[in-house]
């Protein structure tokens, strides 16, 4: 038997979401009577697919059952879908070979580190979506420096604190030369969305340090404030230093369908002038065999006029939930971030510890949240409320919160 990959042993115990699921199961088993538990924890969509998008998926499945329209592997993705993504999300600025269709943005984030190798220093917003850190650790980032203690995170990874004191936008001077920077807006978990000025400063710092930016725009369809940038490519110069991951999961409800993309401009080059775009094509061709044809047919439907109306109505629905949760917390005097332009509400219960708040809300209200400390050291004292839920459950949860 070969030895275990040592990077696995460097991961912090238990990925956040399975740990939450385990505690929820344990709680339900020890409290079989009484109210059911409502989940406002994991960012999993709950509402049925809307009819036009669903019909696109059905048509995709039917096409596979007919000799004339059957298709097999589709490599980088359906050309028409890539064209439509470029048009809808990037004003048509990208050629289809700059848009790579995938089985979701988490999967792309996991593969991305292969572009840079283990010696790269990684910067993440703190708190942040756990995959940026865990995916980097799995690829060996910081393995030479060794793991640091739990409070200060991992070697090889610089945490950029995002707190109320800095308006949830980090001090960019901590980005060093040749770093790989992950940045998510609207942010999971804080709900903060960057302004045009902040985005320009971020891209400016990335360029001045010869760094590289992975911009996660998985929640861009939740932006309602038209002054806020929907893509990193609204910032001048981003086409030389950034790629963007995005997804149909939270916009069209495709969390279970699985469809996303990465925009990789041909103008992004390594320091030696090599092309990231052709390396990404090589990586995808080597370890990925393309997104499901059925999912892609659904994606095509999602990006025509009727599909975009459905995306708008679905995201409006979840934003409606977010507004209810936010106002329930505010009535209790809990300071909150997010809930506008984002399906997440980042609630400050400090100085109480995140897991203690999680337990208290579970026991008193039978509501599952996500402990902020699971997203990074700066998340301690916070819990994240997710607006992904049925309306009746969210209304019920808001009433139960009054018990806190
Ligand atoms: N990026 C962020 C910030 C997320 O919160 C999520 C899912 O919760 C993803 C990416 C993953 O999305 P997908 O379902 O496309 O893998």
Image (tube, rainbow, N blue to C red):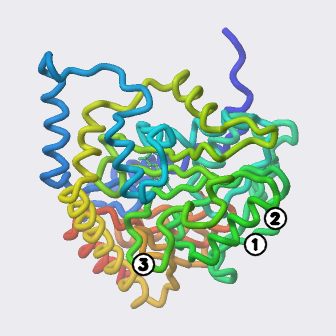
- The spot of residue 241 in percent (x, y) is 68, 53
User: Could you say which is closer to the camera, residue 342 or residue 384?
Assistant: 342
Label at residue 226: 3
**Residue at image mark 2:** 174
Q: Nearer the viewer, mark 1 or mark 3?
A: 3
User: Could you say which is closer to the camera, residue 157 or residue 57?
Assistant: 57
**Marks 1 & 2, CB-CB < 8 Å contact:** yes
Q: Earlier in the sequence, mark 3 or mark 2?
A: 2
- The spot of residue 146 in percent (x, y) is 84, 41
Q: Residues within 10 Å of mark 2 (few under 14, many from 20)?
A: few
Q: CA distance from mark 3 to mark 2?
A: 30 Å
Label at residue 358: none
Residue 117: in sight, yes or no?
yes
Q: Nearer the viewer, mark 3 or mark 2?
A: 3
- The spot of residue 188 in percent (x, y) is 51, 62
Split into 4 quadrants, where in the image is the C terminus? bottom left
Q: Earlier in the sequence, mark 1 or mark 3?
A: 1
What is the secondary structure assignment of the residue under circle 2? helix
Q: Residues within 10 Å of mark 3 (few under 14, many from 20)?
A: few
Q: Is residue 185 left or right of residue 200?
A: left
Q: Compared to 24, does 2 lie above or below?
A: above
**Residue at image mark 1:** 171
Q: Residues within 10 Å of mark 1 (few under 14, many from 20)?
A: few
What is the secondary structure assignment of the residue under circle 3? loop
């Amino acid at each position: 038997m070969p030895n275990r990959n040592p990077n696995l042993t460097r991961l912090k115990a238990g990925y956040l979401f399975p740990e939450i699921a385990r505690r929820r199961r344990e709680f339900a088993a020890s409290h079989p009577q009484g109210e059911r538990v409502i989940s406002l924890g994991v960012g999993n969509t709950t509402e049925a697919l809307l009819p036009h998008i669903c019909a696109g998926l059905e048509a995709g499945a039917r096409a596979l059952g007919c000799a004339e329209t059957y298709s097999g592997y589709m490599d980088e993705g359906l050309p028409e879908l890539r064209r439509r993504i470029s048009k809808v999300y990037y004003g048509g600025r990208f050629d289809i070979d700059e848009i790579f269709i995938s089985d979701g943005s988490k999967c792309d984030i996991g593969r991305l580190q292969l572009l840079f190798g283990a010696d790269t220093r990684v910067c993440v917003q703190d708190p942040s979506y756990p995959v940026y850190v865990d995916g980097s650790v799995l690829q060996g980032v910081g393995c030479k420096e060794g793991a640091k203690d739990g409070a200060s995170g991992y070697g090889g990874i610089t945490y950029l604190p995002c707190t109320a004191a800095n308006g949830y936008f980090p001090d960019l001077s901590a980005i060093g030369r040749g770093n790989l920077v992950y940045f998510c807006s609207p942010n999971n978990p804080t709900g903060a969305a960057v302004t045009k000025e902040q985005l320009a400063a971020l891209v400016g710092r990335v360029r001045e340090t010869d760094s590289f930016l992975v911009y996660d725009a998985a929640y861009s369809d939740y932006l309602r404030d038209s002054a806020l940038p929907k893509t990193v490519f609204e910032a001048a110069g981003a086409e030389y230093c950034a790629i963007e991951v995005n997804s149909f999961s939270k916009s069209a409800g495709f969390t279970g369908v699985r469809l996303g993309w990465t925009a990789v401009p041909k103008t992004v080059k390594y320091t030696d002038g090599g092309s990231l775009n052709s390396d990404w094509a090589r990586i995808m061709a080597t370890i990925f065999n393309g997104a499901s044809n059925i999912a892609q047919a659904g994606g095509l439907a999602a990006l025509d006029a009727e599909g975009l109306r459905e995306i708008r109505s679905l995201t409006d629905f979840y934003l409606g939930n977010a507004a209810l949760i936010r106002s329930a917390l505010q009535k209790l005097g809990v300071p909150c971030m997010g809930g506008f332009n984002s399906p997440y509400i980042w609630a400050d219960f400090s100085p109480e510890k995140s897991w203690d708040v999680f337990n208290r809300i579970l026991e008193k209200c039978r509501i599952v949240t996500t402990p902020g400390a699971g997203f990074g050291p700066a998340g301690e004292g916070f819990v994240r409320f997710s607006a992904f839920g049925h309306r009746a459950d969210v209304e019920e949860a808001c009433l139960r919160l009054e018990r806190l």
